[in-house]
Image: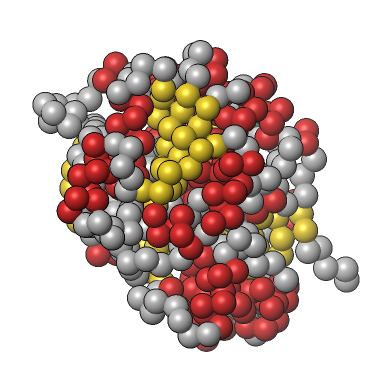
């Protein structure tokens, strides 16, 4: 029997709506709080930062939201993305589990991030916005927003976490290629940045600090809006096109997942794949386990507290009900820059608090061991963020082997590691930070 290694949808099969999990969650989200008054925030309070359409999506309880034709047209540059069956990995592990992965690395910037960058740029363009500002960790988000804003003639300024700016110089080159300007954060361009540098001139930066800088620029310039690549509800909404496609592809394969696994930084990666499957748990009685995999160096889900906290280090964002390590937490300088964030998005936090999803943490060395195993089995080189999901997949596949039970495992191959070879060099020469 011929093995079907890749399950590909046609363009006409691409979803035309995003799925909003807020319509089906057993318990509603707690409100965001105003950073000044500590009262529930109103949509109008967000207008200095975000395009109006994005604010409406942020608070929407509508189950499905139409994807604009202009966004669908750009999506078609790389969507629908393929799903692969990892036969070689299954064989190497000797597991009875079936392992599937959704390959989001085929987008032009090489990750899942354009799924929200494109609609965010589009809605800002429709509102007449001329400039956008954002932060980025490892550079996947910054490159995705630069890619997207370039289509709409919007200027894009990216504050990139300084340690990643130094570790991954070609991410900066990608952003420059798509007309994005890149500033290592903390910087001397903002009051927030200058303050952090005054406290620690050698500060390696964090996503929380970079967010503070990007928000300050947007809040003090009338022609500029802010964009976030994870955490917020509308961002996770846009990413559900991943899981909606995956549902169709697994149906084509005649399978349904027992486990859905995604790396976890702020929530968009994990939520994008898992939310459509969680809907079946909520409405059809399915029992799929959904596991968010974070880094042991930044373990907000596994060791953080559920409480109101700022999304940035300087305390400029609304207070978000989330699992957090504290907004002043500066994580170690691991290579998975997209996972170096102190908090978790409100939706994922509520789902974990309610016991509806699971969380796991993986150390950097284990993640790279898993990445090498995967690359030697399947040929594709994973990004460090993706490698955390692969490590959890290997854990679950080995457990299935020990138990002698077949399981269907689906994970999000959220980005390639072709610009992360310096990190692999450190792994092979035993210079990786262990934690």
Q: How many marks?
A: 0
The quadrant of the picture occupied by the N terminus is bottom right
Question: Residue placed farthest to the left in the image?
Answer: 37
Scheme by which the image is coloured = secondary structure
Question: Residue placed farthest to the right in the image?
Answer: 1
Q: Nearer the viewer, residue 257 or 43?
A: 43
Residue at coordinates 72% horizontally, 71% vertically from top-left? 379
**For residue 259, side relative to residue 433 (left or right):** right
**For residue 376, side relative to residue 232 (left or right):** right
Looking at the image, can residue 407 be seen? no
Instruction: State whether residue 392 is above or below residue 66.
Output: below
Residue at coordinates 69% horizontally, 78% vertically from top-left? 376
Instruction: State whether residue 387 is above or below residue 174.
Output: below
Residue 55: x %, y % from top left: 39, 23
**For residue 46, side relative to residue 265 (left or right):** left
Residue 279: x %, y % from top left: 48, 43
Q: Nearer the viewer, residue 394 or 143?
A: 143
Residue at coordinates 47% horizontally, 24% vertically from top-left? 131
Looking at the image, can residue 166 be seen? yes
Instruction: State whether residue 290 is above or below residue 405.
Output: above
Q: Nearer the viewer, residue 87 or 172?
A: 172
The quadrant of the picture occupied by the C terminus is bottom left
């Amino acid at each position: 029997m011929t093995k079907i290694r890749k399950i590909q949808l046609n363009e006409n099969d691409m979803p035309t709506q995003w799925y909003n999990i807020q319509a089906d969650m057993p318990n509603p989200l707690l409100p965001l709080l105003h950073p000044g008054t500590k009262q529930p925030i109103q949509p109008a309070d967000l207008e200095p930062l975000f395009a109006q359409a994005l604010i409406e999506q942020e608070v929407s309880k509508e189950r499905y939201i139409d994807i604009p034709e202009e966004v669908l047209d750009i999506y078609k540059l790389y969507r629908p993305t393929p799903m692969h069956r990892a036969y070689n990995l299954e064989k190497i592990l000797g597991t009875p589990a079936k392992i599937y992965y959704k390959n989001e690395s085929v987008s032009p910037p090489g990750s899942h991030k354009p799924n929200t960058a494109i609609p965010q740029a589009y809605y800002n363009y429709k509102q007449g916005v001329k400039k956008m500002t954002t932060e980025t960790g490892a550079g996947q988000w910054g490159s995705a927003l630069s890619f997207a804003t370039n289509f709409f003639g919007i200027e894009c300024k990216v504050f990139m976490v300084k340690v990643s700016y130094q570790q991954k110089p070609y991410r900066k080159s990608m952003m420059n290629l798509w007309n994005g300007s890149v500033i290592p954060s903390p910087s001397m361009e903002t009051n927030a940045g200058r303050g952090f540098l005054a406290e620690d001139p050698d500060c390696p930066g964090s996503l929380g600090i970079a967010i503070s800088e990007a928000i300050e620029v947007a809040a003090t310039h009338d022609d500029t809006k802010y964009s976030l690549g994870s955490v917020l509800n509308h961002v996770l909404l846009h990413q559900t096109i991943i899981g909606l496609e995956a549902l169709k592809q697994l149906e084509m394969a005649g399978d349904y997942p027992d486990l859905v696994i995604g790396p976890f930084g702020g929530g968009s990666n994990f939520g994008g794949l898992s939310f459509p499957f969680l809907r079946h748990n909520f409405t059809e009685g399915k029992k799929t386990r959904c596991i968010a995999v974070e880094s042991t160096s930044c373990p907000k889900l596994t060791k953080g507290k559920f409480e109101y906290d700022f999304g940035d280090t300087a305390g400029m964002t609304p207070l978000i009900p989330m699992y957090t390590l504290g907004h002043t937490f500066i994580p170690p300088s691991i290579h998975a820059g997209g996972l170096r964030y102190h908090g978790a998005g409100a939706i994922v936090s509520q789902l974990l608090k309610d016991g509806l999803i699971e969380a796991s943490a993986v150390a950097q060395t284990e993640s790279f061991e898993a990445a090498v195993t995967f690359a030697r089995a399947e040929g594709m080189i994973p990004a460090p963020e993706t490698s955390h999901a692969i490590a959890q997949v290997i854990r679950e596949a080995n457990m299935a082997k020990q138990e002698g039970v077949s399981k269907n495992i689906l994970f999000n191959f959220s980005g390639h590691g072709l610009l992360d070879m310096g990190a692999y060099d450190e792994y092979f020469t035993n210079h990786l930070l262990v934690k």
